[in-house]
Image: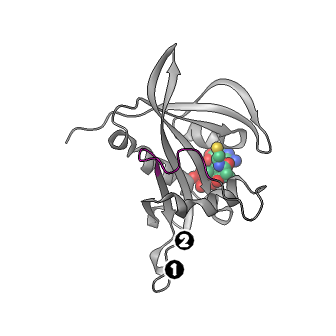
Amino acid sequence: MNPFELTIEEVEARRILAIRTAVLRPHFSASRLAHFPGDEDETTHHFAALGPRSNAGEGQKPEVLAIVSYYQSTLTVDGSEESAVQLRGMAVAPSVQRRGIGGHLLTITLGRLPLLYPTARWVWCNARQSAIPFYQNQGFEIFGDPFSIPEIGPHRRMRRKIPLAIAS
Ligand SMILES: CC(C)(COP(=O)(O)OP(=O)(O)OC[C@H]1O[C@@H](n2cnc3c(N)ncnc32)[C@H](O)[C@@H]1OP(=O)(O)O)[C@@H](O)C(=O)NCCC(=O)NCCS
């Protein structure tokens, strides 16, 4: 599957909860979905990479193959608090991981941040140890001390600058 053939769209929170739960919270019980605080806020933006439309039957929605969400936030840099965006819930369906889909979704959506959050200077995330090289490929750098999230494992904080919006 060519990542460039996928459709990347902003979607409502309810469209991403099933894949978020399956990939990122597989220890949740069957009836518990992985809601995050702020999921329904107006300033939150959820994006999905959707499978080729030709695979979707009449009236059926295309399959959600990968997701990422952005939340308005702040980040303390060199002692001063700066406007920022938190990236959360980055996940790719297990059957299509390591085929460039997550990277493509991240590249496209990071490019939209200057318009979605015009005052934000940074995008940051709590990265799983295993995903650190993935974020480094996208220009993120590690900051702060290692920490662990119960039932999920070791993490590092990572950040990168948001490029300035290009004036049209
Ligand atoms: C991490 C994740 C989002 C990456 O998306 P992806 O579509 O699999 O990644 P891509 O194919 O775009 O990029 C893969 C590249 O990232 C780097 N990478 C290194 N370790 C990696 C890892 N454990 N998982 C994915 N990519 C990794 C490599 O450079 C890799 O290229 P390679 O496969 O040629 O070695 C996806 O694998 C996933 O959902 N994993 C499980 C959930 C998770 O860890 N989410 C992140 C939470 S912080």
Residue type pointed to by label 2: Glu
Task: Say the numbered circle drawn on residue 144.
Answer: none
**Looking at the image, do the residues carrying marks 2 and 1 touch, with CB atoms under 8 Å apart?**
yes
Residue 6: x percent and y percent?
A: 47, 65
Q: Is residue 67 left or right of residue 126?
A: left
Residues packed near mark 1 inside 10 Å, few (<14), some (14 to 19) or many (20 plus): few
Residue for badge 2: 63
Which type of secondary structure does the marked residue at label 2 adopt? loop
* Residue at 64% over, 38% down: 127
Which quarter shows the N terminus?
bottom right
Relative to residue 68, is residue 79 depicted above or below?
above
Q: Which mark is residue 55?
A: 1
Q: Which residue is outermost to the bottom? A: 58
Q: Can you tell me whether the CB of the residue at mark 1 lies under 8 Å from the nearest atom of ligand 1?
A: no
Q: Given the current orientation, which residue lies at the most extreme top position? A: 79
Q: Tell me where residue 39 appears, x and y as whole percent.
A: 53, 49
Mark 1 lies on a secondary structure that is helix
Q: Marks 2 and 1, how far apart in space?
A: 8 Å
Q: Quadrant of residue 161?
A: top left
Mark toward the start of the polypeptide (2 vs 1): 1
Taking the image as shown, residue 30 lies to the left or right of residue 105, namely right
Nearer to us of marks 2 and 1 is: 2
Expressed as whole percent of the image width and height from the top left, the position of residue 122 reads 46, 30
Magenta range: 35-45
Q: Main secondary structure of the magenta part?
A: loop
Q: Residue at x 69, y 52 (%)?
A: 24
In the picture, residue 125 is in which quadrant?
top right
